[in-house]
């Protein structure tokens, strides 16, 4: 396992980067192993290494772009790169061309490093890492593990930095783990929510989709409850003197608590009751409409049965007409 970073940089990773890497890997893997119903084989993009024809050994490559403000590095987006099998390196001309295009669209973003897929960083990754040092003297390496592990709770994404360590009397660059947090904007939250609520390929029943939706809500509430409990226990231990006082964390907790009374104001209660009554009225009208529709079906069936009985000479007296 790689050692931890000592640079003191704070990394913020946006979901768009993870979606791009996952999409890139899925497309290349599908091209290598097309569905049986496909009539023609599509050309494979040269982002895989020579000899890596097995879908399990597919590796894709690209650059990550973003901005650095002080000690905070924020990774906003990424773009794909072409791997050159002849030189066992990235296609430099393609990289320069993509960099110029992105500079025109996103003038405030710069190449911060590169990305790839795999379980762990390998020795050949350092060659690519060194090749990018003329663009960024301290590039970051974002590694996505495409292997599915349902027992794993953390994201399968690792961010590496490079540091020089003395090994056998020689200073050599090695990869070190860097901690990161997930940063989102409104557009990304909407996109991720849309992807999370996509229907399965087989359509899925309404009950299955409802169960998945409720399961997601339950997991979110459960996680929120666990985090609040951890924060509460931490503050209690701090009050008792079991752990040292952290003024920065106390200010954040105080700011969070000050925002809670706003949810219990008179204006909020009036607006909440108004929306609640509107929802009840809509539900009531929907029930009335449903009952009216059922009544119409019963009347239609009764009229059909009564008409057949009249044609066969049945009794017609004493019947109460409907509608």
Image (cartoon, helix red, strand yellow):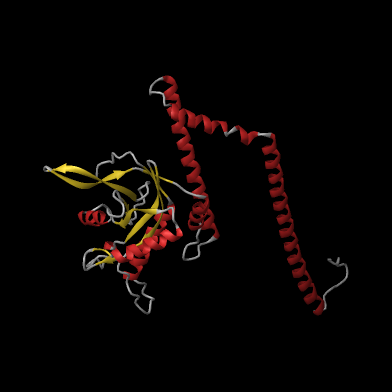
- Give residue 87's position: percent from left, percent from top: 21, 66
Is 251 situated above or below 174? Answer: above
- Residue 276, by quadrant, is top right
Horizontal side of 317 relative to 159 (left or right) equals right
Horizontal side of 233 relative to 169 (left or right) equals right
Q: Compare residues 261 and 284 and report the one nearer the observer.
A: 261
Q: Quadrant of the C terminus?
A: bottom right
Q: Quadrant of the N terminus?
A: top left
Residue at x 69% of width, y 46% of height: 275
- Give residue 139's position: percent from left, percent from top: 30, 50
Q: Compare residues 67 and 253 and report the one nearer the observer.
A: 67
Is 100 situated above or below 279? Answer: below
Horizontal side of 48 relative to 271 (left or right) equals left
- The residue furthest left is 168
Residue at x 32% of width, y 49% of height: 158
Q: Is residue 266 visible?
A: yes
Q: Compare residues 92 and 81 and report the one nearer the observer.
A: 92
Tally of marks: 0
Q: Is residue 47 visible?
A: no
- The residue furthest top is 241
- Give residue 43's position: percent from left, percent from top: 33, 74
- Give residue 166's position: percent from left, percent from top: 16, 42
């Amino acid at each position: 396992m790689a050692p931890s970073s000592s640079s003191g940089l704070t990394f913020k990773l946006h979901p768009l980067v993870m979606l791009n890497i996952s999409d890139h890997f899925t497309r290349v893997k599908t091209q290598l192993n097309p569905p049986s119903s496909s009539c023609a084989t599509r050309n494979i993009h040269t982002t895989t290494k020579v000899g890596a024809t097995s879908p399990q050994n597919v590796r894709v490559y690209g650059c990550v772009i973003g901005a650095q403000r002080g000690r905070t590095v924020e990774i906003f987006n990424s773009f794909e790169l072409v791997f050159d099998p002849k030189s066992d390196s990235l296609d430099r001309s393609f990289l320069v061309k993509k960099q110029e295009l992105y500079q025109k669209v996103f003038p405030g973003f710069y190449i911060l490093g590169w990305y790839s897929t795999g379980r762990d960083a390998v020795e050949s990754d350092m060659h690519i890492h060194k090749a990018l040092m003329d663009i960024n003297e301290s590039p970051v390496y974002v590694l996505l593990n495409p292997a599915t592990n349902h027992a794993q709770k953390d994201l399968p994404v690792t961010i590496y930095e490079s540091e020089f360590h003395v090994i056998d009397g020689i200073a050599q660059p090695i990869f070190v783990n860097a901690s990161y947090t997930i940063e989102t904007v409104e557009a990304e939250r909407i996109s991720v929510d849309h992807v999370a609520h996509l229907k399965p390929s087989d359509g899925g029943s309404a009950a299955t989709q409802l169960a998945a939706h409720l399961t997601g809500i339950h997991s979110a509430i459960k996680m929120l409850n666990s985090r609040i409990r951890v924060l509460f226990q931490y503050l209690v231990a701090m009050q008792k003197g079991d752990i040292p006082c952290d003024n920065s964390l106390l200010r954040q907790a105080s700011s969070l608590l000050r925002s809670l009374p706003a949810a219990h104001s008179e204006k909020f209660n009036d607006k909440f009751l108004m929306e609640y009554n509107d929802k009840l009225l809509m539900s009531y009208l929907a029930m009335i409409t449903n009952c009216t529709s059922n009544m119409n079906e019963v009347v239609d069936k009764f009229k059909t049965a009564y008409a057949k009985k009249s044609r066969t000479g049945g009794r017609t007296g004493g019947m109460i007409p409907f509608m």
